[in-house]
Image (cartoon, rainbow, N blue to C red):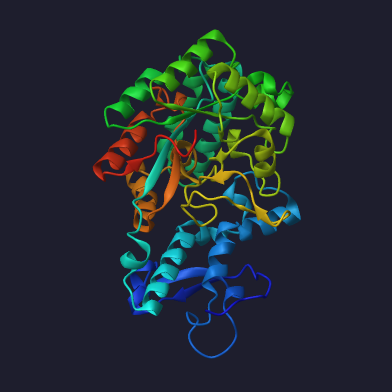
Amino acid sequence: MPKSMSAPTYQLVHVELPDWASDLGVGSPASLLVDACCIQDGEGSQFDRCDWLRAAHLHLSGWLERSVEDRRGPIQSYAFRLPTAWSVAYDHAWANRIFLLLRRMAARARGSSEVALFGPVPAARFHLTHDVDALTKTPQLRLKSAIMQLIAVARLGAGGRFRSALKRARDAAGFVFTSADYWLFDEVCALEAERGFKSRFFFADQMADKSLTAWLIDPSYRAAEPRIQELIRGLHSAGWKIGIHPGFNSWNDLSKLSRTRQEVRASLGADVAHCRQHWLRFSWRDTWAIQEKAGVRYDFTLGFNDRSGFRNGSALAHRPWNSALGKSHGVTCVPTIIMDSQFYDYGFPSDPRAAMVNWIDEVVAVGGEASLLWHVHTIHEEYGWREGYVALLDLLKARCITVVEAISDA
């Protein structure tokens, strides 16, 4: 296989696959997506001239997005801040597909079967997760939700969906002037237990950041509150898992992130090594580095706020490469490919379940691993998102998919 040494071009090329590998590709003709730099000059097909190992590495390292971050700073998990032409890079688990191709190429070169050489392709694994963002309807939540609803109204109106826009406007008005209790943990756990699943809850701590931004955007509860402590310990003792959900300003702030971990760990009375940053705030350069210093070992932040998909072209739990130090980070990244608000605040599919099938089936097709996020408070009837979570659970159950309750040592 040729080795590519030239700099990335950030130009995406679909490389057509031969017949013996067509089942690993996408589209017609079946192909895989690579940076043009991976294709060496010379004679022969693009397939034969492609440095497939480098192509997989570029996807895993988020090469497209990192080029934007290096010039303009982090996109903070909003895909709309990236060139539209790059959207295809996030539609499939390209890195997984390339690794499956390399596996097949190695078996063919040895005249062996893939199973004999490497074993069967692993079954897909999913992590059900919940960010605990709201327990009651605070003034801050009323304001944030009203803004999100009005933005949704504008998007729906711009798309010509005026009836849906009018309904969202009415819902926004009703949300502001009504009360609600989002203590829905028993219901969430019951829905999961009925299907044989258990999930992970990510808890925040309000006192980790006392800024005005944090007051407005961060969850409004203390992990040390007796009721919260009892909840955290009760969930853990019943077999559900606990992680931390550091605040809006913690993505590059070691002290704030460490404070959240300390408070949640003290409330649980045990180690907490799993993390998802609030609002999916994230930097390729900074976030995993400070998480590692804070004692985090698994991160579930890598996903987009405004679309579903594969932010680094993969459905792999892996230790990302730290280019600054020339070695892997000490944090294992589990990408998040689905979040509830992607369907209800951004995409507005007529059938959310059908929209989820695409992403779930991609992970199943490549034997991948990924995280799925549904906020606890959106199970409440006033959101109307509960049916979506039930549909997601039923989809996983119907396909006999493995839902991971714990990973490694936590």
Most extreme residue toward the top is 226
Question: Which residue is situated farthest in the bottom direction here?
Answer: 43
Task: Report the residue at 48% width, 82% height from top.
Answer: 48
Measured along the vertical axis of the image, is residue 177 above or below residue 189?
Answer: above
The answer to whether residue 170 is visible is no
Q: Is residue 402 above or below residue 101?
A: above
Q: Which residue is drawn at the image coordinates 40% and 37% (left, top)?
A: 163
Q: Quadrant of residue 93?
A: bottom left
- Tell whether 142 sits left or right of 382: right
Is residue 309 shown to the viewer in this render?
yes
Q: Residue at x 37, y 24 (%)?
A: 188
Q: Relative to the observer, which residue lies in front, 395 or 342?
A: 395
x then y, percent, for residue 170: 46, 26
Residue 298, percent from left and from top: 55, 39
| Quarter of the image where one finds residue 381 | top left
- On screen, 107 above or below 260? below
Residue 27: where, in percent of width, then height? 38, 68
Left or right: 352, with 232 as reference point: left
Residue drawn 28% across the image and 37% down it: 394
